Image (spheres, rainbow, N blue to C red):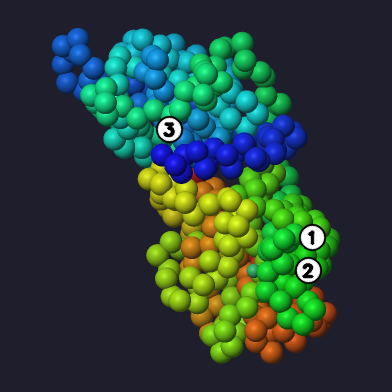
Amino acid sequence: MRWLWALLLVWLALPALADDGTRSALATVDLAGSSLAAEGRDRGKPRPMELRLTISQPVPYRVYFLDGPPRLVVDFREIDFSGTSAEDLPGRELVPALRWGRFRPGWSRLVMELPGPYALRTAVQSPAEGGARGALVKLRIEPVKPQAFVTRGNALSALWDLPSPAEVTPLPPRRTAKRPLRVALDPGHGGHDPGAKVGAIYEAALMLGFARELAEILTRAGFEVVPTREDDSFVPLERRMTIARAAQADLFISLHADALPAGEAAGLSIYVWNPQADDRATRELAMRHDRADLLAGLDLAGTDDQLADVLMDLARTETHPRSEAFAKFAVSELNRAGVGMHRTPVRGAAFSVLKSPDIPSVLIELGFLTDAGDRANLFDPDWRARTAQALAQAIGLWAQDDAARAALSRK
Ligand SMILES: [Zn+2]
């Protein structure tokens, strides 16, 4: 259970981004596609149960148990439960009590009182069934002996109890009007993590500079830019993703120019999430990217529990092809602009910052500071301008293609 505490501390350290008014399209619950069901015949004893919640879009969530009385708690980030009553959930009568509501900014909570001690057997978030849009969260729990009942510590349960309906505050009105495409630009490293170094120049400063140049070109092209850092400060990897998500970014681009032993890497490379990728060079890069967070005590890699994997499965089926599509547009535009690339320009890597389940994300190594040719490029304003221009072009083409595909899948 140690990961749970570690994760919780990470969350508590995050700023309350959800209150800045940018979050306007929260997931909603569809009661018609939701239910609680028990297995087998009712003999007055606790039975295995399945909770199904159909929601309008996939969201990150956590499941755990509390005792006194035994309860199942599901925290969502985040579902707008307003206008729906847990009392109306089909199968509600199978448990002593069921409540849901807004818990605190950025978080919603479902609490189900249980007829005895239970354990979580499966937790799956998959595309909604029957052609409906959105996602289906399925939790299967089974009765266990009291000594096998695993709960989170009591200190927290005292603080975080059932949300009372009075706590549910109205959310800001939803914006439905079309808006410009929003691109999160993530200059790698910063603060006590300077990244790779060549001479007196650090990767962190170089990437901040390039991000500003790219942001200007994107803004002029009519896109909105969300920077994950705007100065030389340390921003943990999860917060970078949270900033993008809170701003409802449509695309996340992390910018790097790392160092690898000479001869191992040269040329611009675009990485998409792939937990299976394990060639030595990308493993080394992944470790470099995570090292600063590890030093700061934020173990993002350690959160890879079963539930996180479930979320990533969803990412693979829905978001991953969109990340790959962007990478392909970028390669073709960069080629056209004469920007030299690695012999395999698009690769997979388990870079933590690419883990967002719902935002297409890529990490671009603009070049490797250990390679003389790449170094010369990175210091050449003309090369940087051509590269930024090509990326802006690729973003525009990808956005059109992505919107067309989304429209097709809705038909
Ligand atoms: Zn880097």
Which x, y percent locates residue 252? 64, 56
Identify which residue is drawn at 55% across, 71% down: 285
Asked if the residue at tag 2 contacts the one at tag 1, i.e. Cβ–Cβ closer than 8 Å, the answer is yes
Identify which residue is drawn at 46% across, 27% down: 153
In the figure, is residue 283 to the left or right of 243?
Answer: left
Q: Which mark is residue 210?
A: none
Type of amino acid under label 1: Asp
Q: Judging from the image, what secondary structure is the residue with disc 1 in?
A: loop
Residue assigned mark 1: 232
Ligand 1 location (quadrant): bottom right
**Quadrant of the image for the N terminus?**
top left
Above or below, 318 relative to 60? below
As measured in the structure, the alpha-carbon distance from the residue carrying label 3 to the one carrying label 2 is 40 Å
Of labels 1 and 3, earlier in sequence is: 3
Residue assigned mark 3: 63
Of labels 3 and 2, earlier in sequence is: 3
Above or below, 185 relative to 371? above
**Crowd class of label 2 (few under 14; some 14 to 19; many from 20; radius 10 Å):** many
In the figure, is residue 342 to the left or right of 186?
Answer: left
As measured in the structure, the alpha-carbon distance from the residue carrying label 1 to the one carrying label 2 is 7 Å
- For residue 150, which quarter of the picture? top left
Type of amino acid under label 3: Val
Residue assigned mark 2: 205
**Crowd class of label 3 (few under 14; some 14 to 19; many from 20; radius 10 Å):** some
- For residue 338, which quarter of the picture? bottom right
Q: Nearer the viewer, residue 26 or 120?
A: 120
Of labels 1 and 2, earlier in sequence is: 2
Q: Judging from the image, what secondary structure is the residue with disc 2 in?
A: helix
As measured in the structure, the alpha-carbon distance from the residue carrying label 1 to the one carrying label 3 is 36 Å
